[in-house]
Image: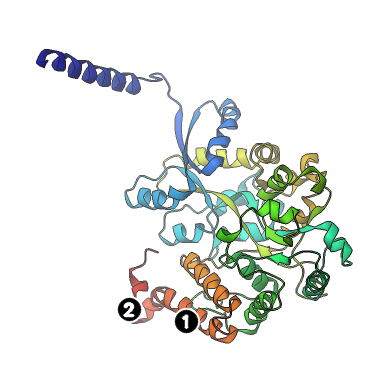
Amino acid sequence: MGTRRFFSLFTLHSSLFISLLLGCSAHPNDNRERLEFWALGSEGEIVQNLIPEFERRNPGIHVVVQQIPWSAAHEKLLTAFVGESTPDMAHMGNTWVPEFAAINALDDLGTFAASSTVVKQGDYFPGIWATNIVGTTLYGVPWYVDTRVVFYRSDVLAAVGFPHGPRTWAEWREAMARIHQRGLCRWAILIPTNEWDPLTMLALSAHSTLLTPDGTRGAFSQPQFADAFNFYVSLFRDGFAPSVSNSQIANLYQQFSQGEFAMYITGPWNVGEFRRRLPPEMQDKWATMPLPAHDVSEQTGISMAGGGSFVVFRASKHKAAARKLIEFLSEPAQQVRFYQLTGDLPARRTAWLSPVLANDSRFPAFRIQLEHVEPLPRVPEWEQIATAIFDRGEAAARGQVTPAVALRQLDARADELLEKRRWMLNRAGGGTPPRTAALRQTP
């Protein structure tokens, strides 16, 4: 037994040693510059289909793509920064850019973008481009874009006099009232109470700044946000929307086709899902439209500017190679190919001229909406503030607090979360340190 165990261990250790030798000696004559690129989610897998063409054009560069799940990406990027082991470049959600800029992790891309013959600011949607600017510095280049529009039952809306959907809040309420009165659907609209996005988009459409201009306090009790908040709460109070969270929705697509609700605010990924999951007889009975405008003086409402961006880390020793890859993946032709592979919408306006997008009846609403998007507040604390938005919105929608009380509570919570930011901005003037737990937050 002892001899057999000895030889088993010897064989195992020998195999591991040989594997290590083989791993270390892989591509021994590869003298190409090694560019490390971290890409998140399914995009990290799919982008590898585009890399061979980049390497063919740039034979001196070898791109190593590491795919990271979205669920682990934020912590992994922060850990890499603290451990001084960041990649050369990464793809990240553009709402993360302010946080990583605040800890001085990202390289300034302003000069690069201004001199590039490929990355042309004027060809990007302004609201999307703005998400990558913190202060006056550009830290990211948009890769793909994301926003929300209204998916609706075109047969139901046509029956109440709005075949192309309502254009203003007043028309929107009228359409919902008619659907409710005539019993054409159980609910006029589905707005899950545990999502902050719909309420935030209503606020943007009402021209709320969400926070004060310096980003140090909440602006939720101000008239613009209060107007949107009251509109939101009224949809539940008047019986147009059910007070349910998204976990209480059994089958979104089946319920939509069966007339449980006539409208739903969602993003581009659901175009494909609606096509796959709705029955054939429903395929000519749904459509998309931009968010309705606050009043008749405006073309559309304002949606959120989302998506993914390229960033280069300050510690990278291969910044020139990283910028070449950004330029390659930013070419309109590559953007169209990436859309075909992923369904992610292109960040470049010229890419939208491709027939695969221009001839699709469900995407003009997104194209229009992308001209009317705004970035969320560019403060690291935003995600925590967003959680407070849906929490107080849900409480008011369920009648647990009045809208006025909910708005005061929301301002108080935002002010608490932003206390460290106020202290940091006042530090040069001898401000006192914050007393709350906000001081201990990771920026």
Image quadrant where one finds the C terminus: bottom left
Name the residue tied to disc 2. Answer: 433
The figure's colour scheme reads rainbow
Name the spot of residue 142 as percent of width and height, x first: 61, 50
> Which labelled disc corresponds to residue 412?
1
Q: Of callouts 2 and 1, which one flags the residue occurring earlier in the amino acid sequence?
A: 1
| Most foreground residue, 149 or 415 | 149
* Residue sitting at x 33%, y 23%: 24
Q: Residues within 10 Å of mark 2 (few under 14, many from 20)?
A: some
Answer whether residue 124 is visible to the viewer in this image. no
Farthest residue, direction left: 2
Name the spot of residue 440 as percent of width and height, x first: 33, 69
Answer whether residue 8 is visible to the viewer in this image. yes
Q: Amino acid at mark 2?
A: Pro
* Residue sitting at x 66%, y 54%: 252
In the image, taking residue 31 as reference, residue 120 lies left or right, namely right
* Residue sitting at x 45%, y 57%: 100
In the image, taking residue 278 as reference, residue 95 lies left or right, namely left
Name the spot of residue 230 as percent of width and height, x first: 66, 80
* Quadrant of residue 13 within the rendered picture: top left
